[in-house]
Amino acid sequence: MQMNNWLIRNASAILTGLPDDGARHIGPDIRVVDGRIAAIGSLEAQPGEPLIDARDCVIYPAWVNTHHHLFQSLLKGEPQGLNQTLTPWLAATPYRFRGAFDEDSFRLAARIGLVELVRSGCGTVADHHYLYYPGMPFDSAAILFEEAEALGVRFVLCRGGATQTRQLEADLPQALRPERIDDYLADVERLVSRYHDPAADAWRRVVMAPTTTLHSTTPDELRLTADVARRLGIRLHSHLSETVDYLDAARGKFGMTPVQFCAEQGWLGSDVWFAHLVKLLPEEIRLLGETGTGIASCPQSNGRLGSGIADLPALEAAGVTVSLGVDGAASNEAADMQSEAHAAWLLQRARKGEQARPRYAGGKFEGGADAASIEDVLRWGSAGGAKVLGLDAIGTLAVGQAADLAIYRLDDPRYFGLHDPAIGPIASGGRAPLKALLVGGRRVVEDDRLPGLDLAELGRQSREAVARLMTRAGA
């Protein structure tokens, strides 16, 4: 019997990622056959069937991370950018260091970021990879796909990049110079032909993803990227409205709001999702919802940079598909999906609570504890992510779906005393250890260990790489 067949027995709780009454399943067993969920219920073991004992464990769908910058995994806590808002932080940290990366440090950064995600129960990673420049001496996209395959996770390459900059090209170091639009589009087509799989349970996808819609290309080029993407049958992704600077830039350059500008260039729709969307006007929320555009909300990065808190309930109510992303580790020193979900749960409640007013001033509620439930946050981080990526066969625990699931042990004291064990991995914070992580039925993590991975050695390599990067960047 193949090792993507399993009977998972005796789970304490199962959260499915489905909405409403379907959000929980009594289980307590899940059968996996040929990498798919064949049954959920009270099941009898078949002769020779491999077993996973999930007693005292909680089962979630494997997380789907819809926005990351994996190369930043060696830039955590960089001092010059630590207390900066977005624009000065960009100059202080990711742009200052981008030329310091060589093939080895880039590969190590990707590996660290992917390992961090996997250990949180993440099975699908969408990386918004914008570290490109003319004459780049290594194929960074190939490295990302190789590292994801080595760990056994699904990988979506959001091919970033820029064709314009705010400085004269002659004054820029090579690693900051923009690409030509023809070269950018030719590389996207190369990547699609080599890696892209349109299947609903694909292991590899490619996405058209200029780094920002307002600053990285011209309007004509942005329209062209949308046209080419739809001809190729791939999705569209970018940053948008992370700070108030986007509102100022769109008004100053184009005389409209950021979302209106994207609409003019064909950059809204169910095949489009944006990272952040923190600073939105009411009419922009309506337009995003009417077009079925998605969001990758990154609450920890938005908090770290002081950008604000996206109004996820309002966006979802308008028709926007909500997903979660960890963003780059240079603006999120805990770039894993468990801590991201914990932050999303707390910050949505805090956001609504900030709006509370005393009754004598017309207030109608005391706080915001009803703003987001555990089930909401899990759905955003699993089913929502699968939907914005177009991977309809993952993201939920249901018969017929791919067996992408995380089995969390609750044997740490932070989970002792829980009246409802199901909420532990999100509500209690920290990192619940993994009994197992299955992706497509393949066991990626076993008893909180990744086969063949020496974490101590990875840590040693990371410390040496950080020292080399600091030297190269003149830090």
Image (tube, rainbow, N blue to C red):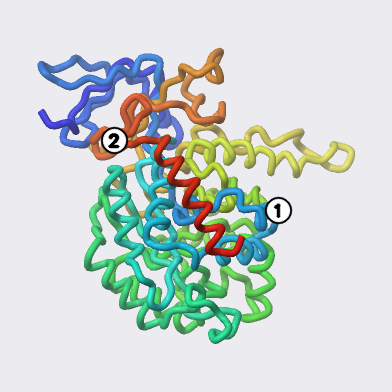
The x, y position of residue 162, in whole percent, is 48, 75
Q: Is residue 66 above or below residue 338?
A: below
Q: Which mark is residue 83?
A: 1
In the picture, measured across the screen, residue 321 lies left or right of residue 54, that is right
Judged left or right of residue 245, residue 180 is: left
Of residue 119 and residue 422, the one placed in the foreground of this image is 119
Q: Secondary structure at mark 2?
A: loop
Q: Position of residue 7 (x, y in %)?
A: 22, 22
Question: Where residue 293 appears, x then y in whole percent?
Answer: 47, 60
Amino acid found under the numbered disc labelled 1: Asn
> Residue 452 location, x and y as percent?
29, 35
Q: Given the image, on which type of amino acid does mark 2 rest?
A: Gly
Name the outermost residue toward the right: 360
Give the CA separation, mark 1 to mark 2: 37 Å
* Residue 404 falls left or right of residue 174: left
First-in-chain label (1 vs 2): 1
In this rendering, the count of numbered labels is 2
* Residue 244 makes an appearance in the image: yes
Q: Secondary structure at mark 1?
A: loop
Residue topped by disc 2: 452
Report the front residue among 399 and 143. 143
Q: Looking at the image, is 264 positioned above or below residue 3? A: below
Residue drawn where x is 49% and y is 30% of the image: 431
Q: Are marks 1 and 2 in contact (CB under 8 Å)?
A: no
The reply to whether residue 314 is visible in this rendering is no
In the image, what residue occupies the spot 41% across and 60% down? 270
Q: Which mark is residue 235?
A: none
Q: Which residue is at a point 38% across and 48% down the rendered structure image?
A: 111
For label 2, the crowd category at 10 Å Cα-Cα, with few meaning under 14, some 14 to 19 and many 20 or more, is few
Near-viewer residue (414 or 82): 82
Location of the N terminus by quadrant is top left
